[in-house]
Amino acid sequence: MDDLLRLDERLDADQRLIRDTVRSFVADRVLPHVGDWFEEATFPARELAPELGALGLLGMHLQGYGCAGTDAVSYGVACRELEAGDSGLRSFVSVQGSLAMFPIWRYGSDEQKEEWLPRMSAGEAIGCFGLTEPDHGSDPANMRTYAKKDGSDWILNGSKMWITNGSIADVAVVWAQTDEGVRGFVVPTSTPGFSAPEIHRKMSLRASVTSSLYFDDLRLPASAALPGVTGLKGPLSCLSEARFGIVWGVVGAARACLESAVEYAKTRVQFDKPIGAFQLTQEKLAWMYVGLAQAQLTALHLGQLKDAGTLEPRQISFGKLANVRAALDIARQARSILGGNGITLEYPVIRHMNNLESVLTYEGTQEIHTLVLGEALTGLAAYR
């Protein structure tokens, strides 16, 4: 499909190389199998992680410890191409790099960094991020998971829910209430008292591992606590990193849906001509492309702000809210163009559409991001 606004011409040579490399990986290693993974509710994380690490995609926007140290736009381009394959694939990379590696890199001790980051960047160790709880998703300040001091150790009790990579992770970055405020802990999943049953019967993000986490008198040494941050600033800064990847990633899912719809419209014949020759279909496709291009422009602008060091959380909220909604609209229109074929896994559309229903909710619901923008416009917080 033509890049009518020639937006990718605004990428530099390194960014275009990353685009082409990731796109080729997705075409060779993901697209031939992802429909089966989705149908079977499986994801070969242990198989793919070293390959993703070898491409430099895990923690790629971090410096040192084997990480690629790319700029923000390069990371965004990679997320776009990964999610053009499947949201579950981008989620795996995003959780590994932005939610598990980033807090260790940003707030961890030298010992924590040396122990985990080189292995995680290589795909030899898998991480997860524990913030959301069964009763506290959008309101993490009231989380119930608690870590209490016992001599120099910490005793961790509580639970987390909707945790990507949870049951396959080697390490979990867990956020808990303490007498000092919210703290982060680096928790090896082999620690006694840790369990992570997988969540089944999902109709979305099926090619992704989603789990609950349980902590039952889990004893941690003092060295397990992240020393560099106290309070909600820690987990919220991680979410900002991951949301940036979503802003770019959903552009890939939307592009895959539009490409499928365009190809189908050109080859599906009804009333003696391709349905793409009918005005109603062309109107749908035109507006789908307008939404896609606007989402890509938003992602590119936010990437440039991030590279300049001026990106604000409320701007990320704008991008997450606008781009996920645009991607969902494109997926739903594509589904209508494909008719009955649009609900089969022979085409990518229903898979992307179902996945985007989860992306709409995780890492900040559309309602929360709406309120972030509302507060930015009025100066009045409407959360409580």
Image: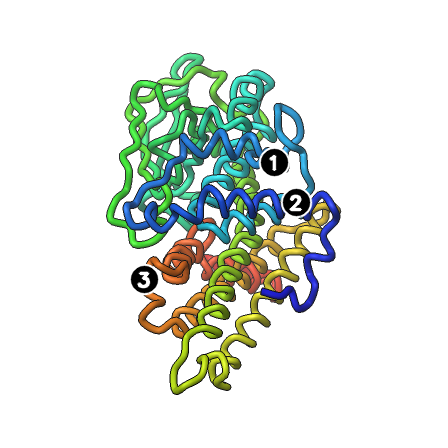
Above/below status of 129 relative to 297: above
Disc 3 to disc 2, how far (Cα)? 33 Å
Label 3 secondary element: loop
Instruction: Please tell me in which quadrant of the rendered image residue 379 appears.
Output: bottom right
Q: Amino acid at mark 3?
A: Thr
Q: Position of residue 154 (x, y in %)?
A: 40, 20
> Which residue is disc 1 drawn over?
60
The reply to whether callout 1 and callout 2 are in contact (CB within 8 Å) is: yes
If you read the primary sequence from the N terminus, does the residue marked by circle 3 or circle 2 appear first?
Answer: 2
Residue at the extreme front of the image, as rendered: 272
Q: Residue at x 55, y 50 (%)?
A: 81
Residue 185 placed where, x, y %? 46, 26
154 vs 323: above or below: above
Residue 234: assigned label: none
| Element type where label 2 sits in the image | helix
Residue at x 57% of width, y 66% of height:
292
Answer above or below: position of 13 versus 342. above
Q: Nearer the viewer, mark 3 or mark 2?
A: 3
Q: Residue at (41%, 25%) from the top-left corner?
A: 170
Q: Which residue is mark 2?
A: 74
Please tell me whether mark 1 sits on a helix, a strand or a loop. Answer: loop
Residue 87 at what x, y percent from top left? 45, 50
Q: Nearer the viewer, residue 218 or 270?
A: 270
The dot on residue 344 is: 3
Q: CA distance from mark 3 to mark 1?
A: 34 Å
The type of residue carrying mark 2 is: Ser
Q: CA distance from mark 1 to mark 2?
A: 9 Å
In the image: residue 234, left or right of residue 136: right
- The residue under the point 45% across, 80% down is 274
Name the amino acid, label 1.
Answer: Met
Residue 235: give x, y in percent of width and height: 51, 39
